[in-house]
Structures are given as structure tokens and as C-alpha cells.
Amino acid sequence: MTLVEKQQTLVAEFSSIRDAQARLTHVIERGRKHPSLAEAQRTEANRVEGCLARLWLACEIRESDCHFVCDSDSAVVKGIAALLCEFYSDQGADEIVSVEPDFLSEIGLSRQLTGNRRNALTRVRETIRAFAQRQLKTPNQPR
């Protein structure tokens, strides 16, 4: 599924949830179902700086596609980060670099978040994009 198709699916999924608090609860539930990082992956190298909650993001290549897993000590932050990890996982680096997560504003999630949580969301996107850009610069080298 392309990122455009994923965006359409997410907009449809979240648009069916009319209440803003219920949408946020849905994000948290998605985060709870997202795989947790192993303790060995909760390193400073995987730490996403810029938010009050501790947040880790592990990036890797699987069968030439990018894959992302996150964890946080905050259920809300993990849910938000997991949403982006699920969105961008199993996609090629070129598509990740070129497609922004516009669905976040379409479903109203960005407006619901505190400044700190919006900052976490931005930092996760920046980290995912930077990882994908590094893959584009070294396409024939093992990752």
C-alpha cells in the first residue's frame, strides 16, 4: 500500500470517530498494540530528543524498505509516534522523504495536542525522514 493509500485509509478510519477525545483514545490504543522496543534498543542513540516524555525510535531496513518501531514512557506520546511508525514502515526511502503525514491535520489530531506533544510528533517525522534520506545517499551499501 502506498503512503497516499495509507493516508486515505487513516483519514477514513479517524473520520468515523466524531469525538476529539475518542480520537485521542484511539491513538493511545493503537500505541498500546504497537510492538515495544527491547530494553537493548532503549539507548541514547535511539532517543528522540525534544519532548518531556522519554521516546525511543529504532529505524532499520527490511527487504529494501524502511521499518520503524518506537516506545515511550507516555501512552499518548507512544500512540502518536506509533501512528507515524506504522504509517511510514514498509515503504521505500524515496516515498518517505517525499510524502508528509497530511492525515494528521485532516483528522484534527494536530490541533488536539499540546505544544510538547506536537514537538514530539515533529521530531519523530524528522528522525524518520533523516533515516530515509541516509538510505537514498547510500543505496548500494549494506545498511
Image (spheres, rainbow, N blue to C red):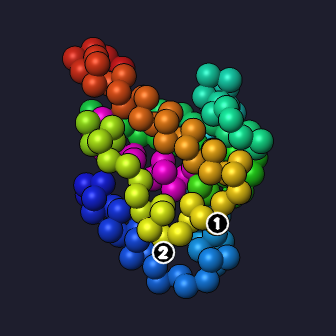
Mark 2 nearby-residue class (10 Å; few <14, some 14–19, many ≥20)? many
Give me the disc on residue 14. Answer: 2
Kind of residue at badge 2? Phe
Q: Is residue 38 left or right of residue 141?
A: right
User: Does residue 100 show up magenta in the picture?
Assistant: no
Which span of residues is magenta-colored?
Answer: 81-93
Question: Residue 65: in sight, yes or no?
Answer: no
Q: Out of 98 and 71, give the one closest to the viewer.
A: 98
For residue 54, side relative to residue 91 (left or right): right
Q: Is residue 49 above or below residue 101?
A: above
The secondary structure type at the circle numbered 1 is: helix
Q: CA distance from mark 2 to mark 1?
A: 13 Å
User: What secondary structure predominates along the stretch shown in magenta?
Assistant: helix
At x 40% / y 58%, what residue is drawn? 102
Q: Position of residue 6 (x, y in %)?
A: 33, 61
Q: Residue at x 32, y 68 (%)?
A: 8
What residue did someone put label 1 on? 112
Residue 122 vertical placement versus 32 (above, below): above
Dot 1, how many residues are within 10 Å of its Cα: few (below 14), some (14-19), or many (20+)? some
**Res 135 quadrant in image:** top left
Q: Give the number of marks.
A: 2
**In this view, which residue lies farthest toward the left?**
140
Which is more N-terminal, label 1 or label 2?
2
**x then y, percent, for residue 111:** 60, 64
Q: Is residue 108 above or below residue 126?
A: below
- Expressed as whole percent of the image width and height from the top left, the position of residue 58 reads 54, 34
Q: Is residue 138 left or right of residue 67?
A: left
Q: Are marks 2 and 1 in contact (CB under 8 Å)?
A: no
Image quarter (top left, top right, bottom left or bottom right) of the N terminus: bottom left
Quadrant in which the C terminus appears: top left
| Local secondary structure at mark 2 | helix
Residue type at mark 1 is: Gln
